[in-house]
Amino acid sequence: MKPVFILVLSAQLSGLCAQEAATGQQQVFTGVYLMNLYDLNVNEYSFYADFYIWFRWKGDRDPSGIEFVNSVEKWGFTTEMFSEEPKELAGGWMYNGMRIEGRFYYPFALNRFPLDKHELVIQLENTDYPIDSLIYLPDTSRFLMREDFVIPGWEVEKAETASHTNAYSTDFGEPTGARSAYSNFTFLIHLKRPLSYFALKLMLPLLVVILASLGALFIYPSYIDARISLPIGGLLSCVFLQQSYSSALPDVGYMVLMDQIYLLSYLLIAAVILNVMLSGNKAATKDGMNFKGLYNNNKRLAIYLFTGYFLGIALLIFL
């Protein structure tokens, strides 16, 4: 009688443990391997990505029923599973994965353009199980992208994965429904614009224009026509240069870093024009004026203006 009781008790305990395991949180180790990232469109706040994603877990819940939180143009998504049924590995582990290609949304913050840095994200959640039933955890894989992976026009710093909880503060129109929280798995790609783009393509032409405008202060004050033509030409050049990069940016309600640098450039050119006009008036109204002293003062002013301009740019960049 006693052995029978022990067997019955053991069976009940085993069933209870199995039921508890079935209702507990299932951990899913998730990995990503990025193949390509292209058509990075700042104006449309989106990019295309082609990557592999895989899942490794223990339990009966299939983690492959996912949706990408920041996906757009879902009609253009392609998904190819590794296998129709999960593959059983040693130690009771289950394994499956898929290759994904689609377009994703990312809200580019362009305040620091052209020295801006971004963290492109691809976020996924399970459509069937909340976080108390299933959680995605980053896999231990060290390789998250192809070794020769590049994005033309950008510098890729690193890639990483992270997991957090995404709680929806709505009942989705069901008054009796509880507000749910889901495990959110995120793949991040850190990238920035190369410094050469800022220095050579944007700042170098602007500096040439600024130096040419300041050159007006190195012309003898009596040559008023030659002096005024340089900063006026520099002003027009600045307008065209600013339009050349602004046309490649979306309409935003704030000034980007390059806009602030151009604002500083306009102020410098305006100061040069004002000085040329005042010097010309003095030269025209005062006979026997000491032009050499005025000329030396203008040269010193040009040095002060350029120094202040350089320091102003440094403050805008580093503060």
Image (cartoon, rainbow, N blue to C red):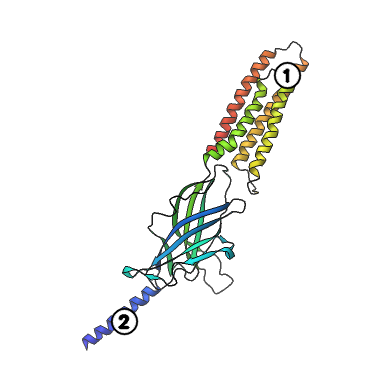
How far across and down, in percent of the image, does residue 166 sit?
49, 62
Q: Residue at x 65, y 24 (%)?
A: 215
Amino acid at circle 2: Gln
Q: Is residue 301 left or right of residue 289?
A: left
Q: Hey, which residue is sitting farthest front in the picture? A: 148
> How much space separates mark 2 and mark 1, taking CA atoms?
105 Å
Q: Residues within 10 Å of mark 1 (few under 14, many from 20)?
A: few
The image shows residue 287, relative to residue 164, as above or below, that is above
Residue at point 39%, 60% (across, down): 139
Which label is found at residue 181?
none
In-image side of 257 versus 52 (left or right): right
Which residue shows up at 62% across the image and 33% down it?
206
For label 2, the SS is helix
Callout in the foreground (2, 1): 1
Which residue in the structure is indicated by mark 1?
223
Residue 319 visible in the displayed image: no
Residue sitting farthest toward the right: 285
- Viewer-nearest residue: 44 or 278: 44
Residue 12: give its label: 2
Whole-percent x, y for residue 283 in the image: 74, 17
Q: Quadrant of residue 63?
A: bottom left
The residue positioned farthest toward the left in the image shown = 2
Q: Front-most of 3 and 80?
A: 80
Would residue 288 be seen by someone viewing this image from the given angle?
Answer: yes
Q: Secondary structure at mark 1?
A: loop
At a point 54% along the width and 53% down the height, the residue shown is 38
Q: In the rendered structure, which amino acid carries the disc numbered 1? A: Tyr
Number of marks present in the image shown: 2
Callout 2–callout 1 Cβ contact below 8 Å:
no
Question: Could you say which is closer to the camera, residue 41 or residue 106?
Answer: 41
